[in-house]
Image: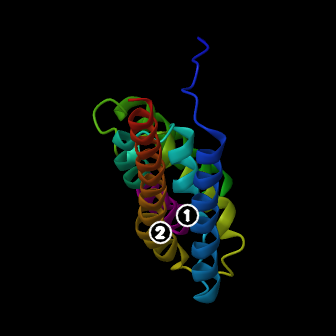
């Protein structure tokens, strides 16, 4: 793996960016908590956006793939209700479903990259883990899906906006420096 040297960003600009991102996270957390909305689907989208180095071209993959992963959790629940009694429990149906899901991701990622991607598998996995704290709410996945799409997009847009503020700040400082030197 090549070492890529990141462009030097002034420390003052990093402070501004940090304040903007922290404000975004804290304000959204207050909203999620006030309205008793599970926040994990939105924050996972935001984190994934950072993981892909704020690559705006991958936002559809994150959001659509994430929503698909949550929807596949719902499909797993339906599959389990239909097959677990016939197969003596949930282990075999879970193995079948997960095996098919992962196989389809590998097989179809080049053809349907918005749906079949690592983001879908991550959200599917987290949904399974989160279902234990959903207090037997069979419709929790709908809230998660809405939170991922709406909240995740808003958080990603907030990050993009924060970077635009940073870019404007740096351009303004560069123009100011250029006019002082002439």
Are dots 1 and 2 in contact, CB under 8 Å? yes
- Mark closest to the chain's N terminus, 1 or 2: 1
Q: CA distance from mark 1 to mark 2?
A: 8 Å
**Residue at image point 47% right, 43% down:** 173
Q: Any mark on residue 50, and which?
A: none
Query: Where residue 78 sits: x, y (%)?
Result: 48, 67
| Res 90 visible | yes
Q: Residue at x 50, y 37 (%)?
A: 52
Vertical placement of 131 versus 19: above or below?
A: below
Magenta stretch bounds:
66-84
Residue 180 position within the rendered picture, expressed as x and y whole percent measured from the top left? 44, 36
The stretch drawn in magenta includes residue 73? yes
Q: Residue at x 39, y 39 (%)?
A: 175
Q: Which mark is residue 151?
A: 2
Q: Tag 1's secondary structure?
A: helix
Around disc 1, counting alpha carbons within 10 Å, would you say few (fewer than 14), some (14 to 19), or many (20 or more)?
A: many
Is 91 part of what is drawn in magenta? no
Q: Is residue 146 above or below residue 171?
A: below
Q: Mark 1 against mark 2, which lies toward the viewer? A: 2
Magenta span: predominant SS is: helix
Residue annotated with mark 1: 41
The answer to whether 153 appears left or right of 52 in the picture is: left
The C terminus, quarter of image = top left
Most foreground residue, 72 or 170: 170
Q: How is the image coloured?
A: rainbow
């Amino acid at each position: 793996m090549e070492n890529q040297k990141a462009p030097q960003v002034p420390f003052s600009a990093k402070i501004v960016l940090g304040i903007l991102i922290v404000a975004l996270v804290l304000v959204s957390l207050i909203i999620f908590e006030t309205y008793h909305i599970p926040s994990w689907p939105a924050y996972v989208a935001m984190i994934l956006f950072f993981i892909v180095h704020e690559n705006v071209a991958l936002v559809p993959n994150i959001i659509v793939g994430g929503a698909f992963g949550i929807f596949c959790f719902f499909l797993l629940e339906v599959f389990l209700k239909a097959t677990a009694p016939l197969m003596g429990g949930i282990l075999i149906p879970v193995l079948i479903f997960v095996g098919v899901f992962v196989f389809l991701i590998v097989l179809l990622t080049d053809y349907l990259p918005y749906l079949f991607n690592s983001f879908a598998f991550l959200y599917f996995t987290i949904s399974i883990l989160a279902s234990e704290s959903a207090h037997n709410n069979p419709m929790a996945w709908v809230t998660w899906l809405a939170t991922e799409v709406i909240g995740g997009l808003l958080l990603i847009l907030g990050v993009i906006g924060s970077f635009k503020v940073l870019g404007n700040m740096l351009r303004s400082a560069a123009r100011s420096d250029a006019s002082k030197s002439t």
